[in-house]
Image (cartoon, rainbow, N blue to C red):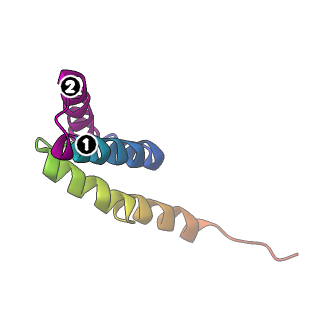
Amino acid sequence: MLMAHPLVLRQLVEEYEGLAALARTQDVGPRIHRQLQDAAFTLCVSTDRQDVDAALTAAREQLDGGLYGTAVRRRSAGRRTVAA
């Protein structure tokens, strides 16, 4: 499965959450609703989920060291450092 870069994923989560908060607190127009739908769709595609709540959960797990943290730890464990 392709995975979004952590920085891109973080931006997607922040964009979605910001738009969702705006839509909950204000009467927003169709432009904001469309941006919210686009952000939700992109999150779902980026996390291989069909539901935006599941996509947010998956994104947070990946960002909090889930899949990305494992990959980084594996690469780091294979490296040897040379003391000067």
Estimate the x, y position of residue 24 in percent, counting from the top left: 16, 46
Element marked by disc 1: helix
- Disc 2 residue type (three-letter): Arg
Residues 55 and 67: in front is 55
Circle on res. 34: 2
Identity of the residue drawn at 24% across and 48% down: 21
Report whether 26 appears left or right of 61. Answer: left
Residue, disc 1: 22
Estimate the x, y position of residue 51 in percent, counting from the top left: 11, 44
Q: Residues within 10 Å of mark 1 (few under 14, many from 20)?
A: some
The secondary structure that dominates the magenta segment is helix
As drawn, which residue projects farthest toward the bottom?
83
The magenta segment = 23-47
Estimate the x, y position of residue 57 in percent, counting from the top left: 22, 57
- Disc 1 residue type (three-letter): Leu
Circle on res. 82: none
Q: Residues within 10 Å of mark 2 (few under 14, many from 20)?
A: few
Q: What is the CA distance from the residue labelled 1 to the residue labelled 2?
A: 13 Å
Question: Quick one: quadrant of the N terminus?
Answer: top left
Residues 75 and 49: in front is 49
